[in-house]
Image: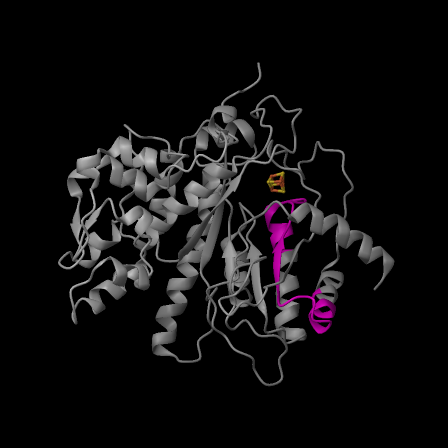
Amino acid sequence: MNENVLEKLKVLAESAKYDVSCASSGTSRSGKKGMIGSAAGWGICHSFAEDGRCISLLKIMLTNNCMYDCAYCINRRSNDLPRATLSVTELVNLTIEFYRRNYIEGLFLSSGVVRSPDYTMERLVRVIKDLRLVHRFNGYIHMKSIPGASQELVNEAGLYADRLSVNIEIPNEKSLQVLAPEKDFKSVFAPMRYIQQGVLQSAEERKRFRHAPRFAPAGQSTQMIVGATADTDKDILRLSSALYQRPTMKRVYYSGFIPVNDYDNRLPALKQPPLVRENRLYQADWLLRFYEFKVDEIVNDAYPELDLEVDPKLSWALRNPHMFPVDINKADYELLLRVPGIGVKSAKMIIVSRRYSRLGSEQLKKIGVVMKKAQYFITCHELAMRTVNELTPENVRHILIQKKGKQFDDRQLTFQFRD
Ligand code: SF4
């Protein structure tokens, strides 16, 4: 490989690493004759597929030059760091070369903004268009859409990318204006709307014409930074919940704020990213998407922040002891899902298994129920345990909190803003 391109690659891959919204799921296209690559059966970026395969995407920026100066971003224009820009041809060749060498199975492409949103977007589109049309690349492509890009360019990108995403970054427009004064919600939400229109229009056309082109078949995703502003978990999750009402929004990613620009007084002085909080947000997000929870049940005006010591479902159960105990042999699916220690899979298996016999604690363990938690919230055949109401929520909470040393309370640090 050309030394110059290799140097650029090092700089640009380093600059791209802070973006976490690169899951590769959502596409089922399989290999095609005369094309290279396959997007079938893919799992999570930089993680493992359902079949145990490690998924590898080339995660790279077209350029880390940027005309904006977002306070939370390593690539902001006022930072003095090595800069690089790949030409469209260099990036296309790099992707194909890496694919042929079996280093990668797809591409996650983003960019700083140079000259204008449309100028940058046009170059990104040329990369993925060349990959698809010239090189017949059939692997997974996730492309970041540039905030403020025109509808025409977003529409074109959707014809070649599996997934498009636009990062919201900051969940509140006022906070965004403080940290990224050159951006606004309009420039972020407009491309999101274009993507949605493209996906829905394509679905309609494909009902009438079988061979009408597909538009971003893996939908769209976004990312929010957690802990860079004083916005609460309630603010973040309410926005996520509203986004999930949109038919094409597949995933909201949460990225614990990494203090890369600690000289900027608008940012909190964190010693380390709020990873516990980030994890709790992912758990709450899971409850919204798969457990039929409403956002106000998880966070609300009385409880604007997630409990860092226990997971959001257990936290909800401890605040609502009147809902328990749940009779495992009678409760409907929705109620089973509310029990701490019972997941989607085990709730479904309980419904099926109890048709044949009354379930007791041994069967529940075999089904995969985490009895360590569930025992305080259920009644079932042969289970003479004391429930949350007899023990009190405070005591159950105390029992279930595993105190492995003093837990790091990252939220306290989040609000230590400097003067
Ligand atoms: S526009 Fe994107 S790349 Fe540029 S400074 Fe802001 S977050 Fe960073």
Q: How is the image coloured?
A: one colour
Work out whether residue 210 can be spotted.
Answer: yes
For this orientation, the residue located farthest to the top is: 419
Residue appearing at x 52%, y 73% in the figure:
40
Rendering coords of residue 3 (x, y %): 86, 58
Up-down: is 282 above or below 359?
Answer: above
Considering every residue shown, the one lying at the far right of the view is: 3
Image-based side of 91 in relation to 311, left or right: right
Is residue 379 on the magenta stretch? Answer: no
Q: Foreground: 351 or 402?
A: 402
Q: Quadrant of ligand 1?
A: top right
| Residue 319 in which image quadrant | top left
Give the residue at the far left of this rendering: 330
Residue 368 occupies quadrant: bottom left
Q: Position of residue 406 (x, y in %)?
A: 49, 29
Name the quarter where the N terminus is drawn. bottom right
At 65% across and 27% down in the image, what residue appears? 262
Residue 71 occupies quadrant: top right
Magenta-colored stretch includes residue 107: yes
Q: Is residue 188 left or right of residue 351?
A: right
Q: Which contiguous range is marked in magenta?
A: 95-122
